[in-house]
Image (spheres, helix red, strand yellow):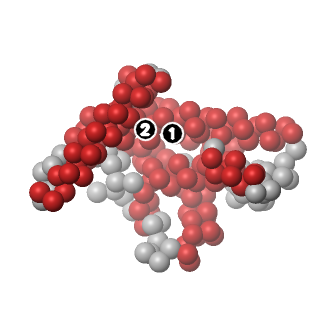
Amino acid sequence: GPIVQFTKAKGHSLSDGLDDVQRAEMKAYMELVNNMLLTAELYVQWCDDATAAEVCSSSGLSLKYIWFVSGLLQVYFRVRERLQKRSAACFYFLFQVYEDVSQCCQALSQRLGTQPYFFNKQPTELDALVFGHLFTILTTRLTSSELAERIKSYSNLLSFCKRIEQSYFYDKISLGSSCRGFRTSRR
């Protein structure tokens, strides 16, 4: 992704300690995450009618926010149209999205096992990518908590997210720990 390319351009790489086989395996897992988790996030945010109705509804908003909702609707329809043109993402059924997330989490869970990171004892680009997607799903409030619940059924992935947050972000976030978002059940 763009972040990995930027760090490489600056002469940094999280995967320097990996051999060619491990690097190829890491790239395969990164593709899995991008194909499954990213698609699920995009689907739920842009193609799920229940989420779109809640996010884009003007009920409960004062008139000063109507311009924002109007702009949000324009973005919503533009992104949804692009998704429909680029792939069949919007033609998924929600249960297929949930099943894809479960399959992806199962593969990630098996690869992680009881290790602190996916490869070696240091984080790689895969760890950063997985954390970013899982943490986003776990802490974003959606109309349904099904995506988060699928992830929560993999205790090692949940522990992985908590460990990464506490190791790299916990002391640096002045707004308090967002870990609370996935320690407790969704509302």
**Where residue 19 sits: x, y (%)?**
88, 44
Instruction: Work out whether residue 120 can be spotted.
Output: no
Amino acid type of the residue that numbered disc 2 sits on in the rendered structure: Leu
Q: Which residue is drawn at 53% across and 34% down?
A: 36
Query: Considering only vertical position in the picture, is 84 above or below 103?
Result: above
- Left or right of 152, for residue 80: left
- Left or right of 178, for residue 50: left
Name the residue tied to disc 2. 42
Q: Which residue is drawn at 47% across and 24% down?
A: 86
Local SS, label 1: helix
**Where residue 82 sits: x, y (%)?**
41, 29
Instruction: Work out whether residue 139 can be spotted.
Output: yes
Q: Which residue is drawn at 78% across and 54% down?
A: 13
**Where residue 54 sits: x, y (%)?**
22, 45
Query: Considering only vertical position in the picture, is 150 above or below 163?
Result: above
Q: In which quarter of the image is the N terminus?
A: top right
Local SS, label 2: helix
In this rendered view, identify the residue nearer to me: 114 or 83: 83
Q: Residues within 10 Å of mark 2 (few under 14, many from 20)?
A: some
Q: Quadrant of the C terminus?
A: bottom left
Q: What label does residue 61 carry, if any?
A: none
The quadrant in which residue 165 appears is: bottom right
**Where residue 8 sits: x, y (%)?**
75, 51
Asked if labels 2 and 1 touch by Cβ distance under 8 angstroms, the answer is yes
Q: How far apart are marks 1 and 2 (CA)?
A: 6 Å
In this rendered view, identify the residue nearer to me: 110 or 60: 60
Q: How crowded is mark 1: few (under 14 residues within 10 Å), some or many (20 or more)?
A: some
- Left or right of 4, for residue 140: left
Amino acid type of the residue that numbered disc 1 sits on in the rendered structure: Leu
Name the residue tied to disc 1. 38
In this rendered view, identify the residue nearer to me: 56 or 108: 56
